[in-house]
Image (cartoon, rainbow, N blue to C red):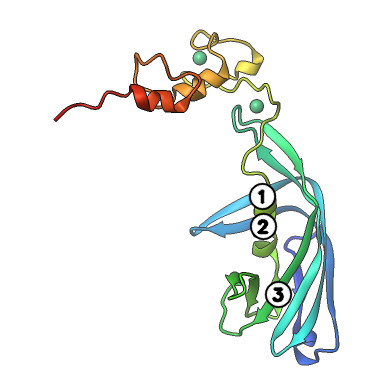
Amino acid sequence: MTDSPRIHLGSLLRSSTEDAHAEGSLDHLQYEQGRTLHTLRFAGPAPFEVDVNALGSNEMYLQGTFEPVLVMECARCLRDVDVPLEISLGTLMRYDPSADAPYLEEAETGEEVLVFGDPDLDLSAYLAETTLLNAPLSVLHDEACRGLCQVCGHDLNEGPCEHMAQVPVEEIDDQLGTPEGSLHARQNPFAALADLKLPEE
Ligand SMILES: [Zn+2]
Ligand SMILES: [Zn+2]
């Protein structure tokens, strides 16, 4: 198991005839977002394999694979859901000694370029971002998940609680943000708008 995925590009930068290779497996990935450290959890060791070859003048091309089973939370009841991903990696890279931490930059062609300043390149941020781009925005542990009671947080998959046990999940969602007493917003979200009586001022 590898702590952080690294690839050593020193000799590739010195002599562009050599390719660089790295492989290993990760049990999680940490990445920074808005100065907060986040962790991507994996259900098991997630294998990665990366090859980098030189394109000349500090530019390189990275290709490889990353196959994590990402652990996400069910959007309704928050229980863990395993999301297997098979990610093909293919990214232009540019060596820029002034770059503190590696980052993705959008080139004029619209392609993303991984810019890095340390030849001992830590791929954590790159792999984390690529994983998030390939992951679904939200998952359900089951299409029929009943979610959590919005009053007490009880998991309604495990049975009813005293509050909203009788209200199907679909209607709970539709009622969000609907003024109390407005009963016509169930099926069509626009019905709510039509019904909304704006105060006359
Ligand atoms: Zn669920
Ligand atoms: Zn409840």
| Residue drawn at point x = 43 percent, y = 28 percent | 190
Q: How crowded is mark 1: few (under 14 residues within 10 Å), some or many (20 or more)?
A: some
Q: Do the residues labelled 3 and 1 touch (CB within 8 Å)?
A: no
In the displayed orientation, state which residue is furthest to the left: 201
Q: Label 2: state its secondary structure.
A: helix
| Residue drawn at point x = 71 percent, y = 35 percent | 81
Q: Are marks 1 and 2 in contact (CB under 8 Å)?
A: yes
Residue that numbered label 2 is attached to:
128
Instruction: Check disc 1 and give the amino acid type.
Output: Leu
Position above or below: 144 against 2: above
Q: Are marks 3 and 2 in contact (CB under 8 Å)?
A: no
Residue 119 locus on image (x, y percent): 70, 81
| Residue drawn at point x = 67 percent, y = 31 percent | 140
Distance CA(mark 3)–CA(mark 1): 24 Å
Q: Which of marks 3 and 2 is in front?
A: 3
**In which image quadrant can residue 37 be found?**
bottom right
Question: Which is nearer the eye, 172 or 34?
Answer: 172
Q: Is residue 149 visible?
A: no
Instruction: Check disc 3 and give the amino acid type.
Output: Leu
Residue that numbered label 3 is attached to:
92
Instruction: Check disc 2 and give the amino acid type.
Output: Ala
**In which image quadrant can residue 90 be found?**
bottom right
Residue 44 locus on image (x, y percent): 81, 45
Q: Does the residue labelled 2 lie within 8 Å of ligand 1?
A: no
Residue that numbered label 1 is attached to:
40
Q: Which of marks 1 and 2 is nearer the N terminus?
A: 1
Residue 200 locus on image (x, y percent): 17, 27
Q: Is mark 1 within 8 Å of ligand 1?
A: no
Q: Residues within 10 Å of mark 3 (few under 14, many from 20)?
A: many
Q: Which of marks 3 and 2 is nearer the N terminus?
A: 3
- Tell whether 161 sits left or right of 13: left
